[in-house]
């Protein structure tokens, strides 16, 4: 039990569990959105059933994204991304397709609540990345759909994707956003805003409900790792059996061919012996050794 608690105490804002709990503090989250989008937001509400961590398995494991709607019914999806995930089988980076998946989830959720297509709310998918995915040192990469033939023509579907590069050096951001990037990267407190974030983190870590939720989260993550490990072992065993079977078939086939060829040589040698040919000539004709032909003759 003590180990789980000490693990929580060591978490920083770059940890997705702690990041979600900080973003569930309305004042902090609202201020970040206002600073990023350079606009005033009257109020925000959280789309989760409760303003606590959602610990449950789905098709992609544990979900720790933050879903928000503001007073103008614009929807936001925020997530911390520490590593740049890669499909090991294909070598392709997963983040671009993940934004597509999140967009689909946001839209599907709205449509399930009875909205028509033209009533779909504006959406922002925002990733806080501790790496520069596009390698252009921009602090913020903002994506909207545009016509390739004329980049001045925008597809006004009101869907925006933003990658925040905490390591970026190009492009303007507000002082509070830059101080937040510094805090995420190195826990450096250099503004009133990051002081508020740091104090909030201390408060969160001392909250018994959060500590209990974190222990549940840790146990669930361990279960998922164990399940993945077991599946990997089973898959490896099955693959090994299949490979062994294939090797056995190949070995058996090779052995059968060799035996068949040897029998054919023996039969040929017997026919030649019956015709009265010399042993040496038969050995040359069948590629058998003289000793082998002598043994066949002795039979």
Image (cartoon, grey):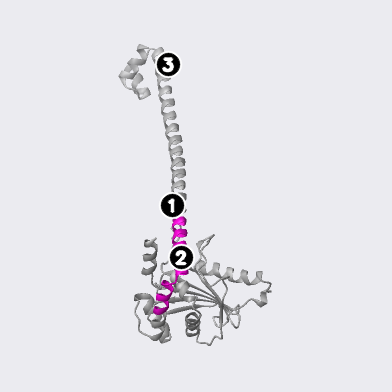
- In the picture, the disc for residue 229 is 1
Looking at the figure, which quarter contains the C terminus?
top left
- The residue that mark 2 highlights is 212
Graded by Cα atoms within 10 Å as few (under 14), some (14 to 19) or many (20 or more), the crowding at tag 2 reads few
Q: Nearer the viewer, mark 2 or mark 1?
A: 2
Taking depth in this image into account, of 191 and 283 the one nearest to the observer is 191
Depicted 52 relative to depicted 179: above or below: above
In the displayed image of the protein, which residue is found farthest to the front?
Answer: 208
Residue at position x 46%, y 47% in the image? 235
Separation of residues labelled 2 and 1 (CA atoms): 26 Å
Q: Which residues are magenta?
A: 198-226
- In the picture, the disc for residue 271 is 3
Separation of residues labelled 1 and 3 (CA atoms): 62 Å
Position of residue 271 measured from the top left corner of the image (x, y, whole percent): 42, 16
Q: In the rendered structure, which disc, 3 or 2, sits on the residue that comes first in sequence? A: 2
Looking at the figure, which quarter contains the N terminus?
bottom left
Depicted 176 relative to depicted 216: above or below: below
């Amino acid at each position: 039990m003590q180990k789980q608690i000490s693990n929580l105490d060591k978490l920083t804002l770059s940890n997705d569990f702690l990041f979600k709990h900080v973003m569930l503090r309305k004042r902090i989250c609202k201020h970040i959105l206002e600073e990023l989008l350079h606009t005033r937001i009257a109020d925000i509400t959280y789309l989760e059933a409760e303003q606590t961590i959602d610990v449950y398995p789905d098709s992609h494991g544990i979900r720790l994204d933050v879903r928000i709607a503001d007073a103008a019914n614009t929807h936001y999806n925020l997530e911390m991304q520490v590593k740049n995930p890669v499909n090991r089988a294909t070598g392709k980076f997963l983040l671009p397709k993940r934004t597509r998946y999140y967009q689909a989830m946001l839209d599907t959720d709205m449509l399930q609540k009875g909205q028509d297509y033209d009533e779909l709310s504006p959406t922002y998918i925002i990733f806080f990345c501790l790496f520069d995915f596009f390698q252009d040192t921009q602090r913020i990469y903002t994506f909207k759909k545009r016509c390739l033939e004329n980049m001045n023509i925008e597809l006004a579907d009101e869907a925006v994707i933003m990658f925040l590069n905490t390591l970026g050096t190009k492009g303007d951001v507000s002082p509070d956003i830059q101080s937040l990037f510094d805090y995420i990267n190195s826990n450096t407190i250099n503004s009133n805003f990051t002081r508020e974030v740091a104090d909030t983190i201390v408060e969160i870590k001392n909250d018994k409900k959060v500590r209990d939720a974190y222990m549940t989260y840790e146990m669930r993550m361990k279960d998922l790792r164990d399940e993945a490990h077991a599946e990997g072992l089973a898959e490896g065993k099955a693959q090994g059996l299949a490979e062994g079977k294939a090797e056995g078939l190949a070995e058996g086939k090779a052995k059968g061919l060799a035996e068949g060829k040897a029998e054919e040589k023996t039969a040929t040698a017997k026919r030649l012996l019956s015709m009265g040919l010399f042993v040496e000539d038969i050995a040359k004709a069948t590629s058998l050794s003289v000793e082998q032909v002598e043994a066949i003759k002795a039979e």
